[in-house]
Amino acid sequence: MKKYSMVARAWIVTVKNPENYGYSGCPRVLCEQLRAQWLSERPSRSGVWMFCLSDDGVPHVDMVLIDKAPFRDRHIFDYVPADSTVPLTTSHDMASDVEHFVQHILDTERVLVMVH
């Protein structure tokens, strides 16, 4: 039986070592580049981008990518690189769920820059 990918309006995406994907510059510029790539051509999109350092010093960007229309994770790769994608399952309030995830990252990781 063929496995179909999940559809969601928001996805949690992580890019580890963004320099390996050709991104360079300061963390803010890097987050702005990823933001511009996601928002290009689609005014219905939004998100949050956080440049972080893990406990072992690995630079990465945690993102919440949002669209008003549900989309499959394969569409993410058309706009940004991703080492992991997880649907942000929301039962009722997208803004509250995004805020909860962002707070979790702020509490558990060293966040150098946040762009939204």
Image: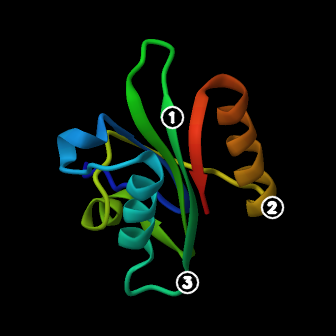
> Which of the two discs, 2 and 3, labels the residue nearer the N terminus?
3
Residue type pointed to by label 3? Ser
| 3, 65: nearer the viewer | 65
| 51, 5: nearer the viewer | 51
User: Do the residues bearing badges 2 and 3 touch, measured as CB atoms within 8 Å?
Assistant: no
Q: Residues within 10 Å of mark 1 (few under 14, many from 20)?
A: many
Residue at numbered disc 3? 44
On screen, residue 29 above or below 67:
above
Q: Secondary structure at mark 2?
A: loop
Residue type pointed to by label 2? Asp
Nearer to us: label 1 or label 3:
1
User: Do the residues bearing badges 1 and 3 touch, measured as CB atoms within 8 Å?
Assistant: no
> Which of the two discs, 1 and 3, labels the residue nearer the N terminus?
3
Image quarter where the C terminus lies is bottom right
**Residue 5, position as x, y percentages in the image:** 37, 55
Q: Secondary structure at mark 1?
A: strand
Q: Is residue 110 left or right of residue 52?
A: right
Residue type pointed to by label 1? Cys
Q: Is residue 17 left or right of residue 70?
A: left
Residue at numbered disc 2? 93
Taking the spot 41% from the left edge, 69% from the top edge, the residue there is: 38
Taking the spot 60% from the left edge, 26% from the top edge, the residue there is: 109
- Distance between the Cα atoms at labels 2 and 1? 26 Å
Q: Residues within 10 Å of mark 2 (few under 14, many from 20)?
A: few
Taking the spot 59% from the left edge, 27% from the top edge, the residue there is: 110
Instruction: Specify the label residue 52 is tagged with.
Output: 1
